[in-house]
Image: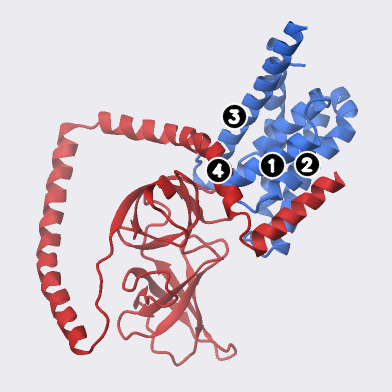
Chain colours: A blue, B red
Amino acid sequence: MVSAVLRNTQSLWVILATFVVAALLLVLPLPGWLDYYRPEWMALVLIYWVMALPHRVGLISAWVLGFFVDVLEDSLLGLNGLVLALVAYMALSLYRRLRMFTMLQQSSTVFILVGLHQLVSFWVLTVSNQNTSPNLMFLVSAFSSALVWPLVFYLLRYLRRSFNVV
Amino acid sequence: MLALVLVSLILMFADSRFGYLQQVRFYASYTVTPIHWLSEIPQSVSNQLADVFRSRNELLEENERLQEELLMQQYQLQKIDHLSAENQRLSELLNASAIVDDIVVRAQLVSESPDPFRKQVLINKGTAHGVYEGQPVLDADGLFGQVTSVEPYYSWVQLITDSQHATPVQVNRNGVRAVVSGTQGSQHEMIMNNMTDTADIEVGDVLVTSGLGQRFPAGYRVGVITSIVRDPGQPFARVTVVPTAKLDSSRNLLLVF
């Protein structure tokens, strides 16, 4: 009983730590031209945890996460909550298939999920009159997210197995 | 899902239309302060390493150059002292209000906005240092931007070239007033709004803040007019302005109090 509780809290800390690292990667200064290619780290880590532990990481945690991303990036409060909850929702309905997919299929799914993530935030920013993007460059990060997905996947799986996160 | 979407929508509406959520954002930003702090580390480490590995000759050269610069600027300051005193007397004669010296505090740029489409930077001073929303920010060469959102130890500064930003200016040569606003995409270009074809402006005119709009103190350099296109088919001339501040390379900024 006690060990189960301990393992529970340990799992929570590991998951939280990965999200903190993702937040760090999200705001880490990059040279200007690379900014367009910055993968949506938060969405990637979220997709992994939803896929691996759907009973633990779900819509509410995605939304709360998004709230803190908004505060971190000084964007419209609730925007990232909305899009991350959306990503989590889609990942939740796909997680059984995602687990069976090959890496290439997973990456393409990630491309679509992150692309929708970008598209919805683009819409919301347009509606709220805060859109400053002159072109479709905002979709580039969906591509780079799909590219780094295998890395994120294997790294997080390694973490999950070595820390026995359940 | 629907409930979350609804909550998000309400939150976003409240945030963009009314200022109810300033407090929430402020207190929540305590939790992200360590992340900003951590993201600062690679930069400060590389800066320190660069300081450690510098040759004596380089330092001597820099020292010499700086002393020369200092001499020149002190010489110019002598004249400015005299001029500002004279200016003060003249404006007293005219019963105009006194020109006050502004107090400035140094701040360091920490990072840029992760969103490449927003021209916004993070600086390492926050409410703990007295920073407030709307505060003007300068660099050594001109107006840099204004504080748009404050956190306890950091704050976000919107650059004057952001497409959401407009700066009230006047032409230094003749005092023509105008508003200069940022453009989408370009980092180095601003547009002078609603300038008629007959307005007395020339390429090379220096624009300074006019002090109208009560945001920016008057007299700080904003930019230089680089091109004027007078198209008879358009109601206004298309005037492009290049900011004098080094918006993409300045690290040391000044906060005006």
**What is the spatial separation of the Cα atoms under label 1 and label 4, in whole angstroms?**
13 Å
- B249 vs B85: above or below: above
Distance from Cα at disc 3 to Cα at disc 1: 15 Å
Residue bearing the label numbered 1: A66
- The residue to which callout 4 is attached is B29
User: Is residue A164 visible to the viewer in this orientation of the structure?
Assistant: no
What residue is rendered at 47% in x and 59% in y? B133
Q: CA distance from mark 2 to mark 1?
A: 8 Å
Q: Position of residue B32 (x, y in %)?
A: 55, 38
Where disc 3 sits, the SS reads helix
Tell which circle, 2 or 1, labels the residue nearer the N-terminal end.
1
Helix, strand or loop under label 4: helix
Q: Which is closer to the viewer, label 4 or label 3?
A: 4
The label shown at residue A21 is 3
Viewer-closest of B46 and B97: B97
Look at label 4 and name its amino acid: Ser
Quarter the N terminus of chain B occupies: top right
Name the image quarter holding residue B77.
bottom left
Q: Relative to the observer, which residue lies in front, A126 or B13? A: B13
Does residue A128 appear to the left or right of B49 in the view shown? right
Do the CB atoms of the residues marked 2 and 1 lie less than 8 Å apart? yes
Q: Is residue A5 above or below residue B115?
A: above
**Comparing marks 4 and 2, which lies closer to the viewer?**
4
In this view of the protein, can residue B55 be seen by the observer? Answer: yes
Chain containing mark 2: A
Q: Amino acid at mark 1?
A: Gly
Q: Nearer the viewer, mark 1 or mark 4?
A: 4
Real-space CA distance between mark 4 and mark 3, rounded to the nearest whole angstrom: 17 Å
| Label 4 Cα crowd, 10 Å radius (few <14 / some 14-19 / many 20+) | many
